[in-house]
Image: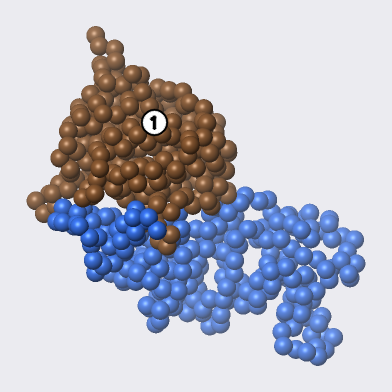
Amino acid sequence: MSPQTNPIAPFSGFGLGLRRTHYEDFLRGDVPVDFVEVISENYMIEGGRQMRILEEVRERLPVIIHGVSMSIGSARGLDQDYLAKLKILEQRIEPLWVSDHLCWTRNSAHNSHDLLPLPLTQEALQAVCDNIDHAQNVLGRAMVFENPSSYLTFPEDEMSEWEFLTEMTKATACYLLLDVNNIYVSSKNHGFSAEDYLAGLPLDRVRQIHLAGHDPATPERDIIIDTHDRAIVEPVWELYAKALEMLPHLPAVMIERDDHIPPLPELLTELDRARAISESVLEPA
Amino acid sequence: MSTLAERQDAFLASILDEGAPLPSGWGNSQAAGMAVYRGNYRGALMSALAETYERTALLLGPKEFAQGCINHAIAHPPSGWTIDEAGEGFDETCTKLFPDRLEVAELAWVEWSMLELATAPDVQPFKPQDFAAASAQFGDEDWGTLRLQFQPRARARLVNHDLETLWQTIGNGDAVSDTKLEAPATCLVSRDGERPTFTLLDADHADAFAAMQDGANYGDLIAVLLGQNDDPAPEDIQAAAMRAGAMLGAWLNEGLVTAINP
């Protein structure tokens, strides 16, 4: 039974991840963004410089907290210590929303620190929904979950990923973070249509879009890897435009760069392009 | 146990151990995908360790550092939700792997301690002048029962190398020469405002600091400084009291004391 949670109101705007390399830029307060997103786990701490900086940035900008370690697909349930610390951060920062990924990262003994794929089965769906109910209950708010990139599918799969996400949102009243690059990466790795994926989702539940770069396939490795370490490729920009055409409203759009982080102007140029595409799609001349 | 739990155990076992059999029913496409997840896992751990142990990596050199990381990851696969924890105990791994280069393990201990301090709760130091005012009317009993509260996660240990020089030398990109100390010293890691830092003090600080951190009072501290001397002469007690006073002054000046009689 899904706990009662308040709906997440749509927030339209363009933002960046707050990364250490750009702390000084954001502290100056003149970065032209509408919000920032931070990796939850980097701030589930007690004090120190990075927490002070986040709190200073939060005074000027809305913040989204985006996790990588909730392990919402863990068959053995959620880590209570993790949830307690996430709740403290949520209360301290009062974010627009709290997000994580449709994946699992750990079992009872070890943590892979990677976003591992789930078999798309009824059993996994039930485990995910039970865990989302638990997390939303602890946090006292609806959460947002991101579609992952994946590098394998399971022989036991019973449904498509978009069907899984649709059932998940219906059962838990959670929302979606649409990672357009991840859709592109998985569609190439597993041979499905990215457009079918978009068309199959409950797009009214989308509250955020991620745009990122990836490591292309090579002659030796016929798999695209989601790396967030380079510029966004043209097919992903095109898929982003298609997604905007299909969405009922403009969500929060973010350029996600986690490695080989360039100077801020380079990311702002990509963000300007995301803005321009949205203007051309949503307000055609 | 559910089928999903069993499959997740098998999946993770395959990531951690390349020799482990792939889960049943898997073919070539799953094997190719697993190779990516294995690479991601190892890459993430290497990156996390390299970020935590920046100077240790420079001291060791890339080949030896990679060897240390691989050994550490195999012996201590991470279990916590933060990848930073993957670096815990790396100094012990270095002690085992590089027994002829113990400055490596000591430097790794400093870097790990500084990482932990960087995110410790923010506290204000108890200023020397405030301590002077608070203790102005202390009698013998007040001094004997005085307890100190230190910065959260501050720590001390004995070291045998001049880590201050080593730190500077590596930071400047200069060649490292022999840094062995003539006698052991205490390395005290603390925070100066938001900035983790460390300093080398006389060797007797290590036990004294640890005792006070564990709740000993000032009277106990004098006993610690007297060590195994069961029948101290008055001048020994006087010397220990003087030494305790000097230590207290040093801790206050370093900003380590955050409260008295907590």
Q: Is residue A259 visible?
A: no
The image quarter containing residue B55 is bottom left
Provide the letter of the chain coloured brown: A
Q: Quadrant of the C terminus of chain B?
A: bottom right
Determine the image quadrant of residue B68: bottom left
To which chain does the residue with label 1 belong? A
- Placement of A13 over or under A177, stated as above or below: above
**Please, what secondary structure does the residue beneath circle 1 have?**
helix
Residue A273 screen position, x and y as percent? 27, 25
Determine the residue positioned at 16% across, 53% down.
Answer: B29
Classify mark 1: residues with Cα within 10 Å, few (<14), some (14-19) or many (20+): some
Give percent across and percent down for residue B99.
Answer: 40, 81
Can you give x and y, in whole percent of width and height, for residue B114 in the image? Answer: 52, 60
Residue visible at 20% across and 29% down? A196
The image quadrant where one finds the N terminus of chain B is bottom left
Tag 1: amino acid:
Lys
Using the image, determine if residue B95 lies above or below residue A146: below
In the rendered structure, the colour chosen for chain B is blue
Q: Which of the two residues, A2 or A228, is positioned nearer the viewer here?
A: A2
At 45% from the left and 40% from the top, the residue drawn is A132
Residue of label 1: A170
Q: Residue at x 38, y 65 (%)?
A: B77
Q: Residue furthest top?
A: A285
Q: Nearer the viewer, residue B6 or B117?
A: B6
Considering every residue shown, the one lying at the far bottom of the view is B231
- Relative vertical location of residue A3 with respect to residue B89 in this rendering, above or below: above
Where residue B35 sits: x, y (%)? Answer: 21, 57
Q: Report if residue B99 is visible in the image.
A: yes
In the image, residue B74 sits, relative to residue A234, either above or below, namely below
Q: Is residue B243 left or right of residue B139?
A: left
Write down the quadrant of residue B202 in the picture.
bottom right
Give the farthest residue toward the left.
Answer: A219
